[in-house]
Each structure stands twice: as structure tokens, then as C-alpha cells.
Image (spheres, rainbow, N blue to C red):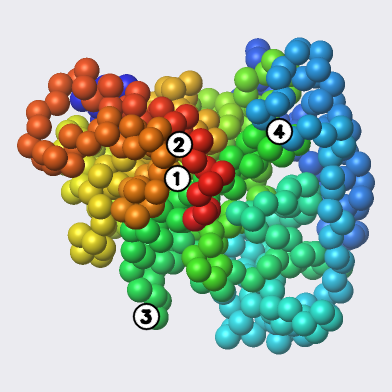
Amino acid sequence: MHLGTWGLKMGGLSCLCFPGRRKVNPKDNGVSDEQHDCKPPDAAATPTVQKVDTELLDQSTEKSQTKQESGTNQSQSSPSSDTTIVKKQREFSYQELVTATNNFKIDRYLGEGGFGQVYKGNLKNPNQVVAVKKLNKDGLQGNKEFQVEITMLSLVCHPNIVTLIGYCSESDQHLLVYEFMSLGSLEQHLHEPRPHMKPLDWNTRMKIAVGTAKGLDYLHNHSEPRIIYRDMKSANILLGEGYHPKISDLGLAKFGPLGDKSYVSTRVMGTMGYCAPEYGFTGHLTIKSDTYSFGVVLLELVTGRQALDNTKEGGQYLIEWAKPMLIDKRRYVKLADPRMKGDFVQRSVKKAVEVALMCMDNDQEKRPDMSEVVDALDFVASLSDPGMVEDQNRNHRLIVNLDSSDDENDGLKEEDEDERAKAIAEAKMWGKGYKHEAANTTPL
């Protein structure tokens, strides 16, 4: 990818990713929407979570058999397992949640999430602070997302994915109960800070980026079946104590394609500004669609700007705003959020921008796997902590030396297109060189 022409290529980025009912041709190397959608629950009956679990186990078995028949190597994509483990969720009564939220009182309101409003609750048995999401009865997709979220969160377990504690379904009342994330969403901190919220410093931003990448890597490479998140955005990254990030709202998630299929054909869903161009144009969903959306979030972390700025006439996409500074690598530092007041290591910012650009490559085949992104961001994060860099072994120091000229002549050295391409190639090698240290380095 030549950065000189990259901006022109990304002009097609303004894909209108409206939540709609668009259908595309499911033929030819794709999987139709009907093959992967969980049936929405009957609004008048309790959702049969056990039945959904059984259906998922069947799909998981089908995928495993397909992999074996095609000779696919699973050693790097998921842990060895013959059985999908499904967590049984607690079923709450509606009255329990009314009591926990003080009848959904306004002072318990946390915000809007996924298909409904979210409230802070206090359970009494056991004593626990939780977040309660109440289904919006007027939502067209609410019932379906309710069922899908229960299903997906019953299948996954990871430190960077929010935990579903239970659910309630009585008559027309549908609610989900999650662990409470005390620091709110990344979107709040970046774009809608409350009076007590201080601007995020660079190290915290990288901690959030690494943790989020790990959660996405788990969904793509270590869950069975593989899961395409489909709704990566700053509003769906929740922060706990110490700014520990967790991915939330899996109501739009889809199972990855089976066998030799390369994508899932589905209607276009998601949020404007985060949608991968090929998905927005064709409805062909792949794990690389998530990678693109993560690149947008990473660029949000660097710049502090929204993925789509609606204050501009017609709206301005973050990538369009950044385009003038992406033509020349020497200008990458100018992208940094001014609220950080320059308190960051410039090389770390530059490398974070490079990782974001690789994730947002217009050619999805050139986007890195999220496991590579995790390794690269681990390295980027280490650059802002000199003590951490000094503790690395010779192999890591060699990687640092390969691009040391960036620090020696920041903003002075002229670079041609070949050198830019070489820099990107080097960036792709970070993970390979750095993973030798991953096991000996304290996780962010």
C-alpha cells in the first residue's frame, strides 16, 4: 500500500452503513443470512436459551467436521476442543430487576446501549453491582439482538469481553444483566467526557487498544465457532477499574463462514464511520471487516476525534479529516489528540498510526490478522515506556534499531514511496519479532 495513493483509494470509505434490511446475493463462495441467524424469541414466551445452545452446538460440530474434511489446520485458529462449552445464564424475574434498579429511576440511567437503555442495578442475592439493559419495545431488531447476545455471550469467556450474568424474559419484558463497568465507555472519555473525566493519557490509550485487540482476536481465532463481531466502535468498548477494556454488545455478531467459504452474506448493519468499504458495498462480511473497524477505533484513540463528525456539513469521516496528514509519514505526529499536550513518545504515536493504516487497508486481503495486531500494539505500547524497551532481549532491540532513524531525524528525512512501503513491511514484522517476549512481559 503506497501512502501517496492511499488517501485517494480510501475516498470510497464513506460507505453508508445504515442499519437496514438490505439483502445481497448469497451465491458463490458465501453464506446466506438465513444460515447463520438465530431465530428471534417469541415475545410472549421465555426464550429457550437451552434450545439456542443446542443449535449452536450443532453448528459448531458442523464447522469442526467441515474443517476436518478440508484439512484446515486449527492449531493457530482455536484451542483444540471437540465440544463447545456453553455457559448457562441466570434467569431473573422482572420484579428482581425492578427492585435492583429502583424501578429504573432516572438517577440509575447509564446510557443507551445496543437495543435499549442501560441502568445501574444492585442485586441482593448475591450482593453485586450490575448493569441492566432493557429492551426497547419499539425496536425492529430488538428481539433478535436479545437472543443473539444471550447466545454469543454464553459461548465466550475472555478478560476483554464483557460478562453476561443473566437475563429476564417475562411477557413483553426483555432484559439483559451484565457485569458493571465503572468507568463507562471509551466513547464517553474521548467524545463526551463528563466533568470528572480527565483526558486519557497516551499509555492508557495504548492499554485500551491492546486489550480491545485481544478481545477481538479471541472472537476471531480462539472461539468455536469463530465469531465476527460486526459492531466494533468506541461506544461498545467499556472500561473497568484501571481502564481495563472489554468489548460489549454482541447483538449484531455473526458466526464466521464455514468450510471453504470466505465470507458471510448478510444485510449491512453497524454504525456509520466504522464500516469496512467492501462490506458496505456488497454485504460480504469477513473477520477482516472487524479489523477495518478496529483501525478506525485506533485512529480515534490517536486523534481523539469521532469516526464521523456530524458538525461538518454532510458529515466528515475521520479518515477524510486525517488524509492530508497521512500523505507524509513525517506528519503523523500532527494527528495526536491535542488534549494530551504533547506528552507522548512520538515514535509510539507514529507506529500506532501505521498499525491503524494497515488495519484500514482498502484491500481486505492485506489487512493483518488480529493476532498480528495484538503483537504489533504490544510493541507500540512498549515504546512509550523506556524502561520496558531496555528490558527487552536482543531480538526486540534489533526491531527497534531497524527504524531508529525515525527518532534521530524526526520530520527532516525525505522518504520516497519505496521507503514507505518498506516501513509498512517492517511494521508487519513487529509481531513476529516481539512475540518471543510476550510470555515474559506483564500484560497491559
Residue designated by label 1: 378
Q: Is residue 143 visible?
A: no
Tell me which label, 1 or 4, sits earlier in the chain: 4
Tell me which label, 1 or 3, sits earlier in the chain: 3
Residue 434 badge: 2
Q: Are marks 2 and 4 in contact (CB under 8 Å)?
A: no
| Residue 336 rendering spot, x and y as whole percentages | 25, 53
Q: Tell me how far mark 2 sits from mark 4, CA to CA.
A: 21 Å
Tell me which label, 3 or 2, sits earlier in the chain: 3
Of tags 3 and 2, the one toward the viewer is 2
Residue designated by label 3: 195
Tell me which label, 3 or 4, sits earlier in the chain: 4
Q: Tell me how far mark 3 sits from mark 2, CA to CA.
A: 39 Å
Circle 1 Cα neighbour tier, 10 Å, few/some/many (<14 / 14–19 / ≥20): many
Residue designated by label 4: 78
Q: Type of residue at label 4?
A: Ser
Q: Tell me how far mark 1 sits from mark 3, CA to CA.
A: 31 Å
Dot 1: what SS? helix
Of tags 2 and 4, the one toward the viewer is 2
Circle 4 Cα neighbour tier, 10 Å, few/some/many (<14 / 14–19 / ≥20): some
Circle 3 Cα neighbour tier, 10 Å, few/some/many (<14 / 14–19 / ≥20): few
Q: Tell me how far mark 3 sits from mark 4, CA to CA.
A: 43 Å
Locate residue 62: give its quadrant.
top right
Tell me which label, 2 or 4, sits earlier in the chain: 4
| Residue 389 rendering spot, x and y as whole percentages | 35, 47
Q: Type of residue at label 2?
A: Tyr
Q: Tell me how far mark 1 sits from mark 4, CA to CA.
A: 21 Å
